[in-house]
Amino acid sequence: MRIVGGAALVALIAGGAAACKKDEGSGGSTAGNQVCDLKIGFFGALSGDNAGLVTPSHNGAKMALDKYNSAHANCKVILTDYDSQGSADKAPALANGAVNDPKVIAILGPAFSGESAAVLPTFQAAGLPTISQSATRPDLNSHNWSVWHRGVGNDNDQGPAAANYITKVGNAKKVYLVQDDSAYGKGLADNAKPTLQPLLVGEDKVTTGDRKFDAIVTKVVSSGADYLFYGGYTAEASPFLKQLRAAGWKGVLVGGDGLYDDNMLSATGKADVEGTVVTCPCAPAATSAGAGFPAQYKAAFGVDAGAYADVGYDVMNIFLEGIAAGKVTRADMQAFITGYNKAGAVSGVTYKWGSNGELDPTQVKIWSYEAKAGVWTPKQELKKS
């Protein structure tokens, strides 16, 4: 029962099924009256270079929805994808499409920080509630977007935790810092830098789309750095690491959750990626409440559950619980989320948001994962400060 959202949720959705009815109108409702064919939007990079970081949470959301719809065959909820490819430039047009569809009453995402900043004004104006499963830039909470909620911790925790790993667990002697030009990469690096500062022997930036890094590679190797902190995404980090290895660099690359995907492993290759460490405000499946989730995920998709798969599942279930309780307008769903206070069936995280859209800090945990023999292996929970 836990894997389908808990006994309470099952009772709610079972009770809601009988009251469900078709409605082609605006999505309005009255007490005790469900509306069918409502839509939950999924907003994020489902294709492109960084889709590997987003696909697991999409799969988790789909698992939750499939279970719900199998119990509500006469009144289903629809998952509508808005594939931003992680681009802040492509995102606004997709956001307009979502807000102009009256059946869309909530958004799971946006997945990345840059696209979040680009589209949240549109969602706010339309009163369309959102819960991001993975956008971690801290200042997203500073815009008074009432519709915005973050389902994980942010880089105010992840950046220092990654730096603590380098300095206290890795006992680094010299550290080189590299960041990309994304909102996420800059925010992560900015939060790691104060702790790393005494050990820094160099800093550099890469540009989204870069694939050749000769100048930076030369500087890293000549600096004698035994650790490199990377703030950014896999698309640039993978070829960068391969070129570092080809130049003879033997140090350890440490990155944030932007590298915590299968593409970082496969594109870089076992030999070159071995020993790389990533951090993530997400706990290993073995420590989560939903013990059966990893096996069910693998049975459904043929691969192990990746980053934020559990959050995608839990967030989708929050929306579905709201629909089952008759929250079938955007305003009602927003109010439902604002008052929510329950543990996720899979992650075990208590989803309760403050007025700034952030989780209770006590619910935020940062873990490290190490590339071993071509897979990400949980290493340890990290101190956040």
Image: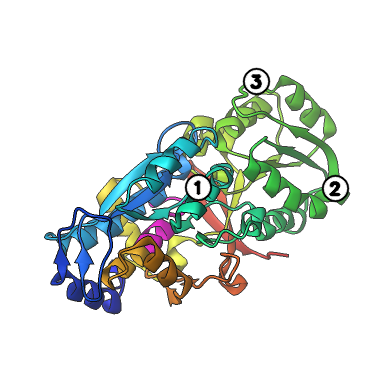
Q: Quadrant of the N terminus?
A: bottom left
Dot 3: element: loop
Q: Which mark is residue 199?
A: 2
Specify the amino acid type for callout 3: Lys
Dot 1: element: helix
Mark 3 or mark 1: whose residue is earlier in sequence: 1
On the image, which quarter does residue 259 sit in?
top right
Q: Residue at x 72, y 20 (%)?
A: 214
Side (left or right) of 224 relative to 77:
right
The percent position of residue 168, horizontal first and vertical second, equals 76, 59
Specify the amino acid type for callout 2: Leu
How packed is label 2: few (under 14 Cα within 10 Å), some, or many (20 or more)? some
Q: Which residue is mark 1?
A: 122
Q: Residue at x 15, y 71 (%)?
A: 19
Q: Are marks 2 and 1 in contact (CB under 8 Å)?
A: no
Q: CA distance from mark 2 to mark 3?
A: 26 Å
Dot 2: element: helix
Q: Which residue is mark 3?
A: 212
Side (left or right) of 35 relative to 61:
left
| Camera-side residue of 123 and 307 | 123
Which residues are drawn in magenta? 305-316
Mark 2 or mark 3: whose residue is earlier in sequence: 2
| Camera-side residue of 101 and 294 | 101
Residue 141 in view (yes/no)? yes
The percent position of residue 57, horizontal first and vertical second, equals 41, 51
Main secondary-structure element of the magenta-colored stretch: helix
Specify the amino acid type for callout 1: Thr
